[in-house]
Amino acid sequence: MNYKNGGDVLPPNLLRELQKYIQGELIYIPKENKERASWGEQSGTKKFLQDRNYEIFSLYKQGYCFKDLADKYCLSVDSIKKITIKFKKSF
């Protein structure tokens, strides 16, 4: 994230209005909701987890037990159960 000087990017009247509320401090101005990426989209984390969870479900369908999957993926047995239940509902 790059910081910009408000005096360089804002119209003078807007700058004066903002200075009534905050002066000399950092302020974050978020993007509009329609332009925001959802969690994990930019970093690839979302796709990574979707692929991992699909792989877990596929192995479960092949007969792997919850305990073995939990050990293989360093997750709790409860997490493995939640992943498989979620996939069962979507198919």
Image (cartoon, rainbow, N blue to C red):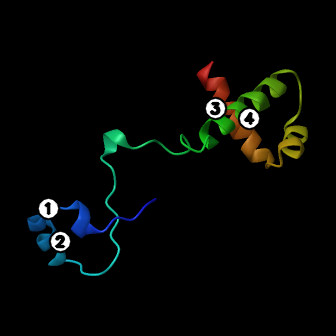
Distance between the alpha carbons at the discs numbered 4 and 2? 46 Å
Residue 38 image offset from top left, x and y in percent: 47, 42
Pair 4/2: label in front: 2
Q: Which residue is mark 3?
A: 86
- The kind of residue on which mark 4 rests is Arg
Residue 12 image offset from top left, x and y in percent: 12, 67
Q: Which of the labelled discs sits on residue 18, or is there none? A: 2
Pair 1/3: label in front: 1
Pair 2/3: label in front: 2
What residue sits 66% from the left and 27% below the top? 87
Relative horizontal placement of residue 23, taking residue 62 as reference (left or right): left
Q: Which residue is mark 1?
A: 11
What residue sits 63% from the left and 43% below the top? 45
Q: 56 or 42, which lies in front?
A: 42
Q: In the picture, which quadrant includes the C terminus?
A: top right
Nearest to N terminus: mark 1 or mark 4: 1
Residue 65 image offset from top left, x and y in percent: 88, 34
Pair 2/1: label in front: 1
Nearest to N terminus: mark 1 or mark 3: 1
Q: Which residue is mark 4?
A: 52
